[in-house]
Amino acid sequence: MKNKIYNNDLLIKGYVDEEIDPKIDIKHEINLLRKQKNAVILAHYYQESEIQDIADYIGDSLYLSQRAAKTKADIIVFCGVHFMAETAKILSPGKKVLLPDLNAGCSLADSCKAEDFSEFLRKYPNHKVVSYINTSAEIKALTDIICTSSNAVQIIESIPENEKIVFAPDKNLGNYIQSLTGREMVIWNGACHVHEQFSLEKILELKTQFPEAKIIAHPECNKPILIIADFIGSTSALLKFTQKDNADTFIVVTESGIIHQMKKANPQKKYIPAPPSDSSCNCSDCIYMKLNTVKKLYNALLFEMPEIVVKEELLLKARSSITRMLEISEKLGL
Ligand code: 13P
Ligand code: SF4
C-alpha cells in the first residue's frame, strides 16, 4: 500500500477509489490511522451520519475554521466541501489538508466567479467587501472581511456606519442581514441550490398538520420562508434552538444532515425535514456534501490524498479576510 502514497493516478475520479478488504473493520482502521498519523477529522453537520459519528469535531463553518486554525494535528481530514477544506489550508498552511472527494464543491461558491466579481467590484469603489465563507480563495483574496451565518450580523456591525458595503455571494443571507442591521448593502445575486428549493406551500401544509411545530430555517432560505420561520440561524444555532426550546416538533428548513445531531441530543422530539418543491428529487440533501463517504474518508487517510493545495501568493492574499473574521469573532466570544 505504502508505495501508492502520492501517486496522482489514484485521483482520476477526484477521490481514491481503491477497493477495501471487506473483512477489515473500517472504523477501527480509521481510528488507528488517525492516531498513527496525528490526524484530526473535522466534519460539517451536513455530512452523512456515519462520518459525523467518526469525526473528532463536528460543527458549523465558523467552528470548523476555528478548529482548523488551532489544531496541533499534522493532517486535517476535512469532511465537508471544497471551500471549507481550502479555508482550513489557508489558516493552517503547514498542515496537510485532505478532502475525501475533491468533487465536493458548492453551488453557492460557484455562483460567484473571481473574474465576474472583480469586474462587479470595479463599479463599487470605496466599499468594504464582506463575503460569506462559502467562496473560493480567489474571492476571499478580493474581500476585506469574511463572515459565516453565525457571525454575519456582528461582522457587518463591526464596520463603521459611514462605510459602504458590498456583500457576496448569497442574496438571501445578504437581504436577511440587511434587514437585521439596517445597513444598506450592495448584494451579489447568488444562492444555494439546497436552500432555494424548499417549498413554502408544503411547509405551510405541514404546519397545518402539526400546528405546535416550530419552523426553523437557515438564513440561506428565500425571504418568504424566513418570514414564516419561528427561528432563523446557522446550523449550530438551529441545533441549539431545538435543544433549548420547549417545542416537541420542528420543521427543519435546511440540509437534512443536521437532524442527526438534533436526534442525538433530544431523541424524544420530532424533526420533520422541510420538503423541496420537486418531490421527485432528494434536494434537501446537498449533493456535494454527500459525496464524502466513510470509504473515501478511510482511503483519504490511508493514501493522504486528495490534498488541498493553494498557491502561496493566493493563500497570503486570501488569509487576511479570514483572520479578520476570526479576530472579531474571538473578541465577541463567538
Ligand atoms: P453553517 O455555517 O450554518 O454551518 O452553513 C454552512 C452551509 O454551507 C450552509 O449551506
Ligand atoms: Fe453549498 Fe448549499 Fe451545499 Fe451549503 S448546502 S455546501 S451552501 S451547496
Image: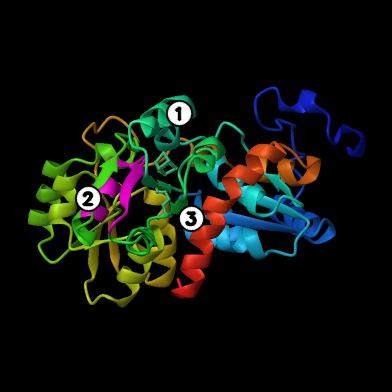
Front-most of residues 302 and 229: 229
- Does the closest atom of ligand 1 sit within 8 Å of the Cβ of label 3? yes
Disc with the residue nearer the chain's start (2 vs 3): 3
Label 1, secondary structure: give it: loop
Q: Where on the picture, by quarter, is residue 141?
A: top right
Of the numbered discs 1 and 2, the one sitting upstream in the chain is: 1
Which residue is rendered at x = 77% and y = 39% of the image? 21
Residue drawn at x 46%, y 75% as measured from the top left: 333
Residue 213 magenta: no
Query: Residue 61: which numbered mark, if any?
Result: 3
CA separation, marks 2 and 3? 25 Å
C-alpha separation, residue under disc 3 versus residue under disc 1: 21 Å
Residue 119: name its quadrant. Answer: top left
Q: Relative to residue 124, is residue 145 drawn left or right?
A: right
Would you place residue 161 above or below residue 19 in this image? below
Image quadrant in which the C terminus is located: bottom left
Kindly identify the amino acid type of the residue bearing the numbered disc 3.
Answer: Ser
Residue at 37% across, 44% down: 126
Q: Which residues are magenta?
A: 162-178
Residue pointed to by mark 1: 113
* Displayed quadrant of residue 67: bottom right
Select label 1 or label 2 by which is in front.
Answer: 2
Left or right: residue 304 versus residue 321 is right
Residue to which mark 2 is pinned: 184
Q: What's the residue type where badge 1 is placed?
A: Lys
Classify residue 68 as left or right of residue 232: right
**On screen, residue 266 above or below 217:** below
3 or 1: tag closer to the N-terminus:
3
Query: How many badges with numbers are in the image?
Result: 3
